[in-house]
Amino acid sequence: LSDDAAVVLLGGGQRCVLTSDMLTDEVDFRLEVCDPRRVGRKALAVNLSDLAAMAARPVAVVVSLALPRRGGQRLARQLYEGLIPLAEEFDIAVAGGDTNSWDHPLVISVTALGEVAGPEPLRRSGARPGDAVLVTGAFGGSSLGKHLDFQPRVREALLLNANYQLHAAIDVSDGLSLDLWRMVEESRCGAELDLSAIPIDPSARQLAASLDDGVSALDHALSDGEDFELILAVPAGEAERLLEDQPLSTPVTQIGRCTSERGLWRQLEGGAREALAPRGYEHGLDG
Ligand SMILES: [Mg+2]
């Protein structure tokens, strides 16, 4: 898939945006150590993050559950106790879904429908050489908690899209450097990063200090994933205005700029640059 969500033509020139995510116990989280309410909330929040990347307004979701037979009813109740408040916060209809039980771990799948705010949905493919690369929030160390409790950047995306000219966007699910690389690849350009400008989450520093595995806080910020922040490509003049305004409750930071040369680069002193390998979580399939 080339965007965070699919754009569906409805006739009469109308369009909607559709996205779906499936989370599995023992793969994406472990119910053994994790409150099911946080899992229910996350299952919705990851979809909202994808809608945010398209600057789409969430309208409705359907929720499908495959519940383990043992304790399934209680588990379903707890999942909804986590999911419903987030749906209410964004005024989203939980429009149905399906519930089954089986002799295996929990699977929860949420499909979300969004409406396109503005004339065009925001895509990954619109970045141009010379655009500023901006990010919301900070990166790295999400495994310490943010991967479950993050705030999807829906309001932020709608506000930015309504008030500034944005060329492209993606949400960071798999790693800042990997998702940035995906965005510029779709745009058939590249990006060079000022590594000293990357906002590092305190959790990334905590993780780097506690693990003693040679992975720096910056490495965590570049590759951990599940930050669910936005990366934006913004024309230089607009970026200047946006950075000056700081219109969000979370900081917006410029971390680099788009280049005509493909790939990812890090800026060196004196205007030189060297290649930077995109790293993050790849959803691998064998065979
Ligand atoms: Mg995404």
Image (cartoon, rainbow, N blue to C red):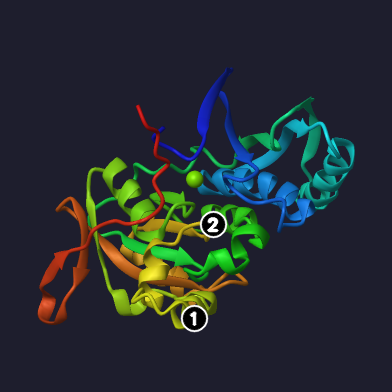
Q: Is residue 6 left or right of residue 279?
A: right
Q: Is residue 75 left or right of residue 140?
A: right
**Which residue lies at the image location 54% right of the left edge and 65% below the top edge?**
142
Quadrant, the N terminus:
top left
Residue 98 horizontal/vertical position (percent): 78, 24
The quarter holding residue 62 reads: top right
Identify the residue position indicated by label 2 in the image: 228
Type of residue at label 2? Phe
Q: Is residue 189 visible?
A: yes
Identify the residue position indicated by label 1 in the image: 210
- In depth, the one of 29 and 163 nearer the eye is 29
**Which residue lies at the image location 36% right of the left edge and 73% below the top edge?**
215
Q: Is residue 28 left or right of residue 78?
A: left
Q: Within 10 angstroms of label 2, few (less than 14), some, or many (20 or more) residues?
A: many
Residue 243 to residue 125: above or below: below
Label 2: state its secondary structure.
loop
Residue 44 horizontal/vertical position (percent): 69, 45
Type of residue at label 1? Ser
**Which residue lies at the image location 30% right of the left edge and 52% below the top edge?**
181
The residues bearing labels 1 and 2 have C-alpha atoms spaced at a distance of: 23 Å
As drawn, the residue found furthest toward the top would be 11
Quadrant, the C terminus:
top left
Q: Are marks 1 and 2 in contact (CB under 8 Å)?
A: no
**Which residue lies at the image location 14% right of the left edge and 53% below the top edge?**
261
Q: Is residue 115 left or right of residue 174?
A: right
Residue 156 horizontal/vertical position (percent): 59, 59
- In depth, the one of 100 and 2 nearer the eye is 100
Label 1: state its secondary structure.
helix
Residue 276 to residue 56: above or below: below
Label 1 or label 2, whichever comes before in sequence order: 1
